[in-house]
Amino acid sequence: MSVTVRIPTILRTYTGGQAEVSAEGATLGEVIADLEKNHTGIAARVLDDQGKLRRFVNVYVNDDDVRFEQGLETATPDGAGVSIIPAVAGG
Amino acid sequence: MAVQTVASTTESTVDLGPAAALSCRECGHRVPLGPVFACEECFGPLEIAYDFSAYDTEELRKRIESGPSNIWRYAPLLPVPADVATKPNINPGWTQLVKADNLARELGVDEGKLFVKDDSGNPTHSFKDRVVAQALEAARAFGFTTLSCSSTGNLAGAVGAAAARAGFRSCVFIPHDLEQGKVVMAAVYGGELVGIEGNYDDVNRFCSELIGDPAGEGWGFVNVNLRPYYAEGSKTLAYEICEQLGWRLPDQLVVPIASGSQLTKIDKGLQELIKLGLVEDKPYKIFGAQAEGCSPVSTAFKAGHDVVRPQKPDTIAKSLAIGNPADGPYVLDIARRTGGFVEDVTDEQVVDAIKVLARTEGIFAETAGGVTVGVTRKLIENGVLDPAKSTVVLNTGDGLKTLDAVAGTGLTATIRPNLDSFRDAGLA
């Protein structure tokens, strides 16, 4: 499954400045593992020591917050858009 | 007494007064002052680290007391240049701390112990003017000319007004289905106002993506890339409450929770006053207030969890309708550390509390104020909040913004213009 991943500004040092990259994987966990293969260091920024999503990282598969879905087990269908976004304050 | 809060180890080139650097609240990683909000190491929120080492307590107290009647009296404790009061800004703050004896009687609180910090008195009628005024100074320092935000309504109005005063362009984003009063109050200042098809969390997500895109380049998003500066504005609520109580800490505070930023910064402000020797170091309790229809933090608190599970909001308290509160975990920490609690009330209780506050104290609160008063009543009934101790309840906005919430309120009677009709209606 090939997906497009939107990279936040603070992680673009790992993607050579690219705001969007392609990655492979049937689940979000697999997509992050594939990102790590091609952009070494990025997984440690998104995941904590236990391999879980850090609490200040929001990840969306298409328009769905993965915390409402299956977290790292959330399916990433072919052509899906994955967005990694730092949590922000209220309004 | 001289106080060393932090040592400045990182070079910063902008003049934002005592602000020395940005520091990650999670891992402590430090970076120079700049328009960034998330830690490059762990995504944790960046916040301002200060150098207060030069301050003498009594000189600082005198300097504050002789300052302007707005938040800039606290400029020595904020990320703003020393001459901030001379720049075009909306100059919010120094709102009334109302001694609420009528409400105290209604809620069963001892006379002289209950106060309402009424922030509806700010220029755009909500506490958001405090945070926007800070963000505006940061935007100026970093050379931005467009001010933007994601908003549940109050912030949109505050940004529009501040941008107009300071000569910035503004373009703000709100959920498309906000209360009409808030839409008008945001639009009237002449900036661009964009409705997003979705809830506040969707708007936030959009703004976060816009900020990383060339389309959003050069924009100062007050609650995104200027968040570390913006959030500090809420400290001024803590400073004012203590100064208005005669430089004393209240025993208990009841604070609304949306993202949780305000509550965490009120705690930070109280801690700073203690460290600086401006108030006596004694225990205080902070209580968080949510609406039942958007209660991710109170749910986590009551369940004993450290993690806040997001919810899909469904409440009339739209200014608090943030289902994925970024500072929720910190609110849990603070409520537990201080011996407080996080409680929620139904929309019906919110409306009732709005009416009680209006009837007893002449304060017309927006729904968020109904949430804090409603939660205060519930906490007293449940024996969680001590009615014999000094308590400050926050009202963060004006009821004119959420008229729909009390739409059933209206005429007592309609009569003909004569005395008989007046008497017949039982009004004599």
Image (cartoon, coloured by chain):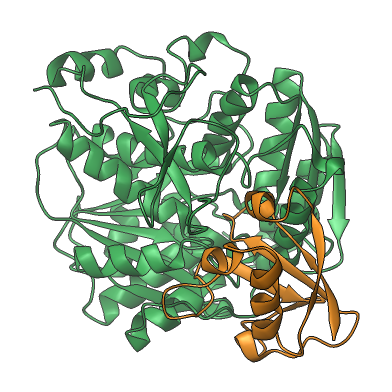
Question: Which residue is nearer to you in this view: B235 or B318?
Answer: B235
Q: How many marks?
A: 0
Name the residue at 82% across, 60% down: A20
Q: Is residue B379 above or below residue A30?
A: above
Residue B144 lies left or right of residue A51; in this view the side is right
Residue B70 seen in render: no
Task: State the image coordinates of residue B320 (x, y, percent, origin top left).
Answer: 58, 63
Name the residue at 50% across, 58% down: B369
Residue sitting at the far right? A79
Q: Colour of chain A?
A: orange
Residue B189 seen in render: yes
Name the residue at 63% across, 24% down: B142
Of the 4 image quadrants, the one containing the N terminus of chain B is top left
Of the 4 image quadrants, the one containing the C terminus of chain B is bottom right
Residue B18 lies left or right of residue B146; in this view the side is left
Residue B211 lies left or right of residue B259; in this view the side is right
Task: State the image coordinates of residue A12 (x, y, percent, origin top left).
Answer: 69, 51
Task: State the image coordinates of residue B370 (x, y, percent, origin top left).
Answer: 50, 64
Q: Is residue B124 above or below residue B211?
A: above
Task: State the image coordinates of residue B242 (x, y, percent, origin top left).
Answer: 25, 38
Name the residue at 18% across, 33% down: B247
Q: Is residue B1 above or below residue A33?
A: above
Question: Which residue is nearer to you in this view: B278 or B6?
Answer: B6
The answer to which quarter of the image holds residue B171 is: top right
Q: Colour of chain B?
A: green
The answer to which quarter of the image holds residue B145 is: top right
